[in-house]
Amino acid sequence: MLNARLFQMMNEQLNQEFYSGYLYLAISSYYATEGLSGYAHWFKKQAGEELEHAMKFYDFIISSGRVVDFKAIEKPEQAAFNNLREPLQLSLAHEKKVTGNITTLYNTAKEIGNTSAASFLEWFVQEQQEEEENAQNNLTAYENCNFDIDCMKKLDRQLAAR
């Protein structure tokens, strides 16, 4: 069973994963209105992945004998952007924040000796490495295009293939 502290932290992370889905849908919506359907597709898929992460936390909390404590999901802090780069920067910053949250959660589970929670969270530790790498790669690829329209179209097609 989860102790009160770990239970609260797991619930907060579940909420954060739902928020991540909202954020990525907001970014997807922005790129769709900008005519970049590949970027829109990539972030829509990413939103779905974040919802899958939330469900992993949901299942773990339930299997630990607790009832999920649902909280309101915060509105994404930014849904309108000044340029195509801003959502990519926001995505990277967000993934770094989530990595910090997961690391804290993992360390807490180890500290209190909850080996099943620590084992469960190891997957998320690895996943966050991938998430940060993908966010950084998307930003770097965009920056490397240096406003070249043909390069941007190529990136958009690549992201549509996800």
Image (cartoon, rainbow, N blue to C red):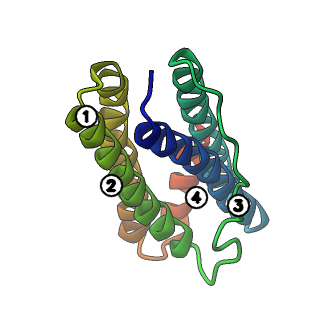
Q: Nearer the viewer, mark 2 or mark 1?
A: 1
Determine the CA span between mark 1 and mark 3: 37 Å
How crowded is the residue under tag 2: few (<14 C-alpha within 10 Å), some, or many (20+)?
some
Where is residue 62 drawn, in percent x and y? 59, 20
Q: Which residue is the extreme one toward the right? A: 33
- Give the mark nearer the N terminus: 2 vs 1: 2
Closest to the camera, between mark 1 and mark 3, is: 1
Q: Which residue is mark 4?
A: 153
Disc number at residue 33? Answer: none
- State yes or no: discs 1 and 3 in contact (Cβ < 8 Å): no
- What's the distance in space between the residues labelled 2 and 1, CA to CA? 18 Å
- The quarter in which the C terminus is drawn is top right
Check contact, mark 2 vs mark 4: CB within 8 A.
no
Task: Choose the circle earlier in sequence order: 4 or 1.
Answer: 1
Secondary structure beneath label 4:
helix
Instruction: Select label 3 or label 2 by which is in front.
Output: 2
Q: What whole-number distance in Å separates the C-alpha atoms at marks 3 and 2?
A: 22 Å
Regarding residue 8, the answer to whether it shows in the image is yes
Secondary structure under badge 2? helix
Up the image or down, 105 lies above or below 115; here it is: below
Amino acid residing under circle 2 = Gly
- Image height of 8 relative to 143, above or below: above
**Residue at 66 percent of width and 66 percent of height:** 76
Residue 26 marker: 3
Q: Mark 3: which amino acid? A: Ala
User: Mark 2 or mark 4: which is in front?
Assistant: 2
**Which residue in the structure is indicated by mark 1?**
112
Across and down, in percent, residue 73 comes to 70, 55
Q: Amino acid at mark 4?
A: Lys
Q: Is residue 130 above or below residue 119?
A: below
- Residue underneath mark 2: 100
Residue under the image location 58 percent in, 21 percent down: 59
